[in-house]
C-alpha cells in the first residue's frame, strides 16, 4: 500500500498528516498544503473535497512546494490512491461529444495531440483498459484530469471545463 505525507509549510515544515488510503475530505487534518512527500504508490490529489476541482498526479518522491506538482495554489482537500495496474492500455478519443466525429484509438502516450491528429479538442472518450491522465497543454503541462476505465460522454465527465487537451499519458506505477 502507498503512503503520502502532507505538510502545511514548504520544504516539509509545519503541521503534517500521514495518509495511506483514499480520503474524500482532508480539511480537518491541515489548513493548507505547501509540500508533499510520497513514500509509496501513485496518487491523485484534488483541490476540493469529494474528489473535485483541480487534479494532480504524484508518484514516489519529494515535492517541496506546490509548484513542483504543477499546483495552482496550496489547497489539497481530497486524495485517491491508485491501484497497481499491469495490464494493457486502450482508449478511444472522439472529436465530438457522445462518441461522435473522428475517432482515434490509443495504446500509448501522446505528448502533443495537435501534432498527432491536428486538433486540440477531445469532447468524449472511452477508456477500455488502464488508467490515463489528460493534460490541458502539450508535453504533460497544465490542468490534469484522471481517467479510469469507463465512458466519458462529455469533457465535463472527467472534470474539465473545456474540451482542450494538449497531451495524455498512461498512468503506470513509478515506485
Image (cartoon, rainbow, N blue to C red):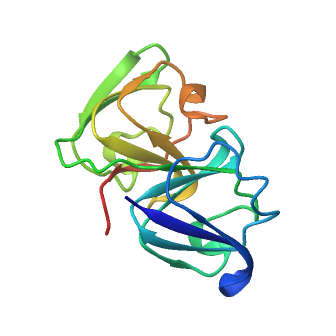
Residue 74 x/y as whole percent: 76, 65
- Vertical side of 113 occupied by 41: above or below: below
Residue at position x 47%, y 65% in the image = 3
Question: Camera-side residue: 143 or 173?
Answer: 173
Residue at image location 17% in from the left, 43% down from the top = 87
In the picture shown, does residue 18 fall above or below 170? below
Q: Where's the C terminus, which quadrant?
A: bottom left
Residue at horizontal 44 percent and vertical 61 percent from the top:
139
* Residue 37 in picture, x, y percent from top left: 54, 75
Q: Position of residue 173 (x, y in %)?
A: 30, 60
- Specify whether 134 is left or right of 63: left
Rendered residue at 60%/47% (across/down):
23
Residue 30: quadrant of the picture? bottom right
Q: Quadrant of the N terminus?
A: bottom left
Would you say 146 lies left or right of 6 here?
A: left
Frontmost residue, 4 versus 91: 4
Q: Indicate the position of residue 56 as horizontal and vertical percent values.
A: 56, 56
Question: Would you identify the image quadrant in which residue 31 lies?
Answer: bottom right
Nearest the eye: 124 or 5? 5
Residue 51's place in the image compared with 140, above or below, is above
Going by the image, does 147 lie left or right of 80?
Answer: left
Amino acid at each position: 500500500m502507498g503512503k503520502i505525507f502532507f505538510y502545511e509549510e514548504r520544504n516539509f515544515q509545519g503541521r503534517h498528516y500521514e495518509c495511506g488510503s483514499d480520503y474524500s475530505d482532508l480539511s480537518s487534518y491541515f489548513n493548507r498544503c505547501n509540500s508533499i512527500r510520497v513514500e509509496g504508490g501513485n496518487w491523485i490529489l484534488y483541490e476540493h473535497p469529494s474528489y473535485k476541482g483541480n487534479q494532480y498526479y504524484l508518484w514516489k518522491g519529494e515535492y517541496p512546494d506546490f509548484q513542483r506538482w504543477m499546483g495552482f495554489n496550496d489547497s489539497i482537500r481530497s486524495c485517491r490512491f491508485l491501484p497497481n495496474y499491469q495490464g494493457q492500455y486502450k482508449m478511444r478519443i472522439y472529436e465530438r461529444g457522445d462518441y461522435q466525429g473522428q475517432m482515434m484509438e490509443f495504446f500509448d502516450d501522446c505528448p502533443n495531440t495537435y501534432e498527432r491528429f491536428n486538433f486540440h479538442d477531445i469532447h468524449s472518450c472511452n477508456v477500455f483498459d488502464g488508467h490515463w491522465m489528460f493534460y490541458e497543454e502539450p508535453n504533460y503541462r497544465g490542468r490534469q484530469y484522471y481517467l479510469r476505465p469507463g465512458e466519458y460522454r462529455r469533457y465535463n465527465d472527467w472534470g474539465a471545463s473545456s474540451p482542450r487537451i494538449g497531451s495524455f499519458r498512461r498512468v503506470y506505477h513509478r515506485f
